[in-house]
Image (cartoon, rainbow, N blue to C red):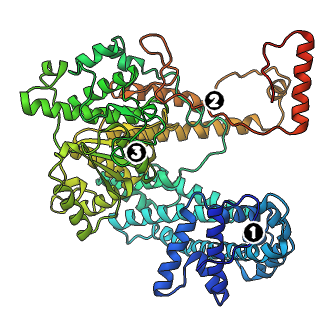
Amino acid sequence: MQNPAPDIPGLFADAEKDELYRFVARVQQAAKKDEKETVWSAKNAPGTLRSRLTKWALFVKRRPQFVLHQRVHEIIADAGMDHWAMLDVSATPRDLKSIDMQVQIIVGKCGDEILELLYDQPPRNPMADGPLLTMLITVVLGGMRSDVTRTLNRITTLEKTVEGHAALLFSPKLDGRQLLAAIKSVTTNAKRLIEARAKTRRTDDEAKNATLQERMEGLRDAMDRKKAKEMTDETFRMIVQMTDTRQLDDARQALDAALEEPIDDDNYNPIEDGKPMDSWNLDAEVGHISCRSKPEIYVSLGIPTERLPCFSGWRDPDRCHDTWTEAEDPAPADHKVPAELKWHQVVGLRRLAEAMMARKSLLVLDEVGVGKTLQVLALIAYRILCLRSLEKHGRLPGSFEESPDAEVLPGLVVIVLPPTLIKQWRSEIETWFLCNTIFIAEYTTKWHTDTRRAWWKALKDKTDYPPHHKIILASRSAVFSDATRAFTSKGIVNPQRVEDTLFGAQIGLLVADEIHEVRNFGHRLNTMIELVRHVGFLIALSATPLVTRPQDTVQIGRMMHIPGCTAELARRFESRLRAARKADANRRKQEGGPVNVERAKALRGERISTEEYESPKVQRELIASLQRLFKGSAMRRTIRSLDNLGNPIWGADPPIEIYVFGKLYDHERECISGLVARDIRDGDVGQWQSVS
């Protein structure tokens, strides 16, 4: 049944209006205030109603084009009318009931201003549209109140949990296992408590977070065999005497993750986030390939025709057509361009193939626009060619035939990636591969006996496709869920529990996109380490040239099984950086102390000490160590890198020019006509065409 549709002008599209009407209709049908809040949060609804409302809430939140509730939320928060702002000035900052009436009064007085901001212009018909959008604002406030309530309850619960488990660290009755469990519990819950307190935006909560952060740093020092006041001498001796390094590593990693907070120190990170480390020049990593022409590299790969198997002969730069949709929606001729790799992408394919043949992990740090995804797809196609050649001729193609150690592992292709990139990877595969030459399977659900068994059975039943023609796009959460199933409580793979998981599958090529996002989480890091150990090597992709924390890059090296990259090395890096930061803090404190002769001269510009701070020096030393460790295991090109002809490389399609023809206003036409008349008078008419 169609809802009545009053005219809503301004920034709402038709689809947004329809969803808004349905949304508000559901609110209006709710009989009580709690039910209205349920439409937003679906927290207290029973049975099928809860299911229906939950789906609705997720639908509203996930649809990117429907951002109406976000606009209302931002308007209320920016105006300082939200619950957190009211609690901040309240005498009882943990009592929501004390501010409920105040919030409603303020929002009621500012309702017209909110509607005007929401419309981006004064409402045409406030009498008709006002109640509709005011109801929406009421629902948003209800949702905000529910979020605040949950956060406050969470803070109260976590404070009790952290204090209780921290007290256990002083208990003389704990054994080693119980002690580590207490440390991990304190660590995990302290991080959650810090995040929850940060939402309140209160000064006293910031001070509490700073104190808790110091306690966590003390625990981290204790894990590094440094005396700390957070535990007794007996407890500290127990930690020192522990021999289970895996459990200690897990506890340290959890502490590192909890302590990973932004540091207000301009001298902490001399390397900006996302900025390439210019001192790490990786041109030499592909120098033996980049000296050749494109045909020469193809010949060395055993592809004199320059056509990869299963690759389409054409593609649509506008991404409107591909061979997978050609039967139902044929592509016009002007939408087809040859599906060819550029020179630098063929260089990348050769380098990836060398890593695959040597079963050696490779970190690909190519800049956005160079074409990391396409190079991986080309490697998948080339792997198909290699396995075909081995099956038919008993040898590898191209120059790899002469390498006695070259080997191509049979099995599935698994690409581990964030769930937000699954659709993008599927689109790229369908753009470059011929229809029905590759089977794409999405692996996204959590482990469950029945669903996983059915999934793997369905994949096995696809007998039309050999294993190396099957690409599994696996979300990280699904991989981590498999690890929970396959690992024992001590983090060791249990051979009896790997069935129907990735850890029991025959995988011939493992790729991980956005690898830097997994670098500092205990369980996730260990999962990737074990999965790479199961396969033998990893092709790791990251658009981030290098994370700014050298110890994080060591963790990436651990996932890649690079010799020398160990948990102990990451701890040493962290320890050196922590000591350098403390030294810099002491130096700044001295420089900002009482006025003396040296400080007076420095203030006049006659700086005596030009010594560099300690953190940048330590950072450079650690980065130099990383460069030595990653030698032969990393590749990076930017869009400023040059090809064999001296031109900058660029992997993306050229930009599309779009012409928009608009109608001129009278004053614009008069202005242009005046300029034309002036140039005609001056004899400079070549640059003008007639203006109609």
- Residue at 38%, 65% (x, y): give it: 181
The amino acid beneath tag 1 is Asp
Which quadrant would the C terminus be assigned to in this image? top right
Q: Is residue 596 visible?
A: yes
Q: CA distance from mark 1 to mark 3?
A: 38 Å
Residue 383 in which image quadrant:
top left
Q: Quadrant of residue 643?
A: top left
List x then y, in percent, for residue 126. 84, 72
The label on residue 613 is 2
Q: Position of residue 389 (x, y in %)?
A: 12, 29
Residue type (three-letter) at the residue carrying disc 2: Tyr
How dense is the environment of label 1, judged by Cα within 10 Å: few (below 14), some, or many (20 and up)?
A: few
x and y percent of residue 8 in the render? Answer: 74, 66
Vertical relation: 321 (above or below) 669:
below
Q: CA distance from mark 2 to mark 1?
A: 63 Å
Q: Is residue 655 above or below residue 83?
A: above
The x and y percentages for residue 661 are 71, 36
Label 1: which secondary element: loop
Which of pointers 1 and 3 indicates the residue nearer the eye? 1
Sequence order check: which comes first, mark 1 or mark 3? Answer: 1
Foreground of the two, 23 or 419: 23
Residue carrying label 3: 427
Left or right: residue 89 versus residue 373 is right
Q: Toward the viewer: 328 or 452? A: 328
On residue 7, the disc is: 1
Q: Quadrant of the N terminus?
A: bottom right
**Residue 461 or residue 322, whichever sits in front:** 322
Which amino acid type is marked by label 3? Ser
User: Outermost residue, bottom direction?
Assistant: 31
